[in-house]
Each structure stands twice: as structure tokens, then as C-alpha cells.
Image: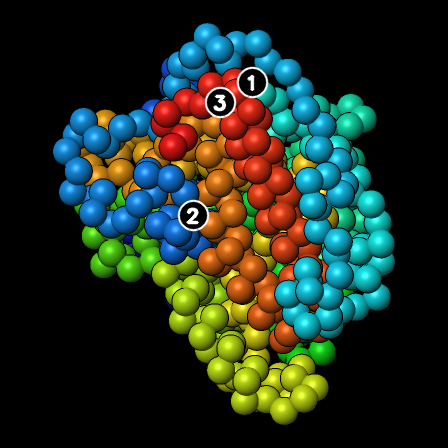
């Protein structure tokens, strides 16, 4: 796919952001809180993409309650297709009290080699992180808060004065502890330029400063601001983790400049104009978009179309114009084809295939695995490495070292899930099992345990094996699963004690 005038067959709706942009200026929107998504206009809000979705689908029958039993739920009658919105709690739950769970509480992980899940491999950075105490005490309210009232989505409560308006430096970006959500949307516009400049990409590919800024700013506008999760912050988060796996993880040693550029570009735009629900929803509601792409990777293909046939052809936004002027047309086209491949590999339907391929390749490699696994001179090796990186970056929220950040992202994806379940129920469609019943922090925590167990931990354990310098992702993922287990266990203990009555929906 190349940058060309819009085809008549691709009838792309104009950006809602464009309608609010006087004289071509960009409309900057504030971050949202959970109450914004569960207001009376919530039907217009978004849901999920495959990032966490496919992972949790695999876990739905293993760890959650009756809402996630098995695929037979798809044939339930309408009275069984209940909405995942907030329930009314019994009067016994009204006397709310706060319980603090800190580091080491109720059997917190001891962060040893067994906890890492990667045989004890680890970088100095991972080891240093293991020595640090858990930064924030866990605040769990009894009864658990309904999802619509959860404080897990931090927004303006981010210390010290809410999300920063100051763009992050490259030193801040090059850190496992960087928190994308602690920045206002517009403060992150320069992040793409910063990571490209780290690799001297603008100079090597003749990218002008203005074009780079305009492209990033318009890419921000073309992300869905009404999606709780799949928005501009997620796009930057994916690009940021891609950068970390390249730089701190050492993957850049096995890739060419073309691969690094295409990978960072693809990570930033992979969810442009995301609908807020998943591919399955597009297919089973028979949308025009699903028909356009033959029911295959619908949202990923749509993001590519918007990027290539709207953003890049917008005046002043073509970051490849310098290459065209230099007569490097074939190279420019090859970069876009590479980026297209990487974006399509963010489709969660490909998760299992990718994990099996990585496991087989790692098993066949002779120790030490990394040195024989990847080769800068092998096209297949480079392609597989890039696929692994962008998929890992896309689902990387569970590996953050600050559990408050992890819970923030969790509340966002859970909000999208709950909204999709509500729409499915109202349309008389089978409710996606792992999206159903996400009424409160307890049920969300239970679902996350399954997601970690069946998708996140196996994949990030493999990433840590394939990139030993990125062992941090494997060990931290395991620790965060333990924290969700602590939340569930604590609430279960309180309920068993008889201090509060258990809502029968949680059985």
C-alpha cells in the first residue's frame, strides 16, 4: 500500500477532530475519567481491540466465574445476555471501609528467580528493579467499587498536579518506569520525533522537523478520543515499549535502520481511528468496514487506510516527502510495506501462531539463545523479531513496574469491554464471555488473573528468553499477576469472615 489519493472505494469519514479545528489548528482534548465513559452517552463510547481481548478469551473458561464459562454462552437467550454495567449493591455493602495492602502483604511475591518465570535470566536493570520496594500501597475498598466509580483510572489524581503538559525528554522515554498516562495528549506529540532522533532517522531519511511534528499532531487527532483504551495514549505507549525493546532490550543490534523506522512508525499508528470495539464485533454486526476488508484484521486494515490515505497525504504531514524528493521511491514504498506487515501482526488472532513460532525457534537455537536466534543478515529473522516486538508492545501494559499504572490501563480496557458487552446485549447478540459481568474491581481482577496466566506471562516469558536484556518484562508481569491475586484473595477472605455479604453475581 502506498500513499496515493484516496480511492473512491475507500469512503473514509472525515475526522471528528477536523470539525473542531479552526484555521487548521489542532483541537487538544483533556484526558478522560471513568465517569466520562459511563455517562448517559456511553452508547457512543468505545470498547476493545485485540490487545488484551484474545488473551482473556483463552482464559475465560479457566479463571473467571459463570460469566466466562464456555462458548455455549453464545447461544443463551436474551434474558441471559445481561449487560456488564454497574449493579445496585445491597445495603450491607454501603458502609465502605478502606484496606491497605502493601509490599509483602498476604504472601506478596518474593521476586526471586522462580518468580521471574525465565529461569533466573535478567539484566542489571531487572535485578535493580527487583530490589526496589513496591512504590505504592494498594488501596482496596470494601465493597469493591463498581467499575464506573473506580479510582483505578487516575487522570487528574496523577501526582503532583495531574498529567504533565511538559513533553518528556529522551532520557525519560528511555526507561522501563516511564508512564505515558502521566502526560497530557499534546505533551506526547514530540515523543515520536525524540525516539526517531535517537536513531538519527530524520537525517537518514530526509524528514523535516515541521513534517514530523505535523504528522505526529495529526496522528494524535485521528486517534479516537472517546475510546477509554485504544486512544492516542495507547499508540504512544506501544511506540514507547517498541523503543525500549529496541534500545534497552538490545533488539536494535539485529535490525537495519529500515526495520527500526518502520517498526516505530507502525507502533504509533497501529490503532489510528480505532472503533473502541474488537474485530469480532465488526464482523458479527456486518459493518461496511468488515465487508471492505473481507472480515480479516478489520480494525488493523482500517488504521492502515487512515494512515496511508488520509494522514500522510494531508498537507505538511508527509514524513516521506524528503525521500520522494531524493528519488528514493522504492525504498519509501518498501518502508510502507514493512510497516503494513507489522501493523497487521497486532491482530490478536495471530497471537497463538506467533508464540508457537517463537517457542520453536528458541528451542532450535543453541545456547546462548539470543546470539544464535537473531541475525541481522537474515530477512526471516528480522521479520520475526519485529513481529514479536510490536505484539509485545501492543499488550505491554501488564509489565509496568508501577501497579497503579497497570491498574489504570486495566480499568480502561475493562471499560471498553463492558461497553461492548452492553452494546451486544442491547442488539440481541451473544455477549462476548470475557467481556461480560465486569461490574467491579473484584471481577475485573479475577479476569486479569486469567489474562496474565494464559496470555501475558507465557508471551512475555518468551520475550525475556529471546531478548535477555529485556528480562524485566517477564519478571514484572509475574509480580503484577500476584498483586491481582492478592486483591481477589483479600476480598474473598473478608466475605468469608461474614463482615460483608457476597453479591451472588460473583459466585
Specify the label residue 499 is tagged with.
Answer: 1
Residue at 68% over, 72% down: 119
Tag 2's secondary structure? helix
Q: Is residue 298 visible?
A: yes
Image quadrant of residue 90?
top left
Residue 99 position within the rendered picture, expressed as x and y whole percent measured from the top left: 68, 24
Residue 505 position within the rendered picture, expressed as x and y whole percent measured from the top left: 36, 27
How far is mark 2 from mark 3, CA to CA? 20 Å
Specify the label residue 63 is tagged with.
Answer: 2
Quadrant in the picture for the C terminus: top left
Which mark sits nearer the N-terminus, 1 or 3? 3
Tag 1's secondary structure? loop
Residue at 40% over, 71% down: 353
How far is mark 1 from mark 3, CA to CA? 19 Å
Image quadrant of residue 281?
top left
Which mark sits nearer the N-terminus, 2 or 3? 2
Amino acid at each position: 500500500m502506498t500513499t496515493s489519493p484516496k480511492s473512491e472505494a475507500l469512503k473514509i469519514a472525515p475526522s471528528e477532530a477536523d470539525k473542531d479545528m479552526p484555521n487548521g489548528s489542532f483541537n487538544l482534548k483533556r484526558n478522560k475519567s471513568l465517569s466520562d465513559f459511563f455517562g448517559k452517552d456511553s452508547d457512543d463510547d468505545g470498547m476493545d481491540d485485540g490487545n488484551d481481548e484474545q488473551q482473556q478469551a483463552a482464559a475465560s473458561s479457566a479463571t473467571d466465574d459463570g460469566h466466562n464459562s464456555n462458548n455455549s454462552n453464545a447461544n443463551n437467550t436474551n434474558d441471559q445476555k445481561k449487560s456488564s454495567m454497574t449493579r445496585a449493591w445491597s445495603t450491607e455493602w454501603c458502609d465502605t471501609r478502606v484496606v491497605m495492602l502493601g509490599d509483602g502483604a498476604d504472601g506478596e511475591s518474593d521476586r526471586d528467580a522462580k518468580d521471574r518465570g525465565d529461569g533466573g535470566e535478567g539484566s542489571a536493570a531487572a535485578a535493580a528493579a527487583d530490589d526496589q520496594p513496591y512504590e505504592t500501597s494498594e488501596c482496596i475498598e470494601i465493597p469493591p467499587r463498581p467499575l464506573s466509580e473506580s479510582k483505578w483510572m487516575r487522570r487528574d489524581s496523577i501526582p503532583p498536579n495531574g498529567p504533565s503538559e511538559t513533553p518528556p525528554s529522551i532520557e525519560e522515554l528511555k526507561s522501563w518506569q516511564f508512564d505515558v498516562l502521566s502526560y497530557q495528549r499534546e505533551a506526547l506529540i514530540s515523543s515520536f520525533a525524540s525516539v526517531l532522533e535517537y536513531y538519527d532517522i530524520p537525517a537518514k531519511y530526509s524528514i523535516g522537523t515541521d513534517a514530523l511534528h505535523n504528522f505526529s499532531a495529526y496522528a494524535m487527532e485521528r486517534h479516537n478520543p472517546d475510546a477509554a483504551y485504544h486512544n492516542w495514549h495507547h499508540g504512544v505507549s506501544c511506540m514507547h515499549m517498541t523503543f525500549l525493546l529496541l534500545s534497552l532490550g538490545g533488539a536494535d543490534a539485529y535490525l537495519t535502520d529500515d526495520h527500526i523506522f518502520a517498526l516505530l512508525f507502525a507502533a504509533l499508528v497501529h490503532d489510528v481511528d480505532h472503533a473502541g470495539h474488537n474485530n469480532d464485533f465488526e464482523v458479527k454486526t456486518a459493518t461496511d468496514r468488515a465487508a471492505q476488508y473481507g472480515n480479516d484484521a478489520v480494525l488493523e486494515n482500517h488504521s492502515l487506510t487512515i494512515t496511508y490515505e488520509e494522514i500522510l497525504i494531508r498537507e505538511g504531514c508527509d514524513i516521506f516527502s524528503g525521500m520522494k524528493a531524493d528519488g528514493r521511491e522504492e525504498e519509501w514504498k518498501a518502508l510502507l510495506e514493512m510497516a503494513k506487515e507489522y501493523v497487521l501482526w497486532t491482530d490478536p488472532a495471530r497471537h497463538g501462531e506467533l508464540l508457537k513460532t517463537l517457542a520453536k525457534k528458541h528451542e532450535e537455537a543453541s545456547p546462548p539463545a539470543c546470539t544464535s536466534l537473531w541475525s541481522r543478515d537474515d530477512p526471516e529473522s528480522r521479520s520475526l523479531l519485529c513481529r514479536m516486538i510490536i505484539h509485545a508492545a501492543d499488550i505491554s501494559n501488564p509489565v509496568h513496574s508501577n501497579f497503579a499504572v497497570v491498574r489504570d490501563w486495566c480499568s480502561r480496557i475493562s471499560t471498553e469491554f463492558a461497553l461492548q458487552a452492553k452494546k451486544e446485549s442491547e442488539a440481541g447478540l451473544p455477549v462476548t464471555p470475557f467481556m461480560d459481568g465486569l461490574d467491579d474491581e473484584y471481577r475485573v481482577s479475577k479476569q486479569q488473573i486469567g489474562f496474565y496466566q494464559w496470555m501475558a506471562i507465557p508471551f512475555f516469558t518468551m520475550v525475556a528468553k529471546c531478548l535477555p536484556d529485556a528480562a524485566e518484562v517477564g519478571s514484572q508481569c509475574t509480580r503484577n499477576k500476584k498483586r491481582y491475586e492478592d486483591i481477589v484473595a483479600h476480598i474473598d477472605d473478608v466475605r468469608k469472615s461474614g463482615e460483608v455479604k457476597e453479591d451472588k453475581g460473583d459466585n
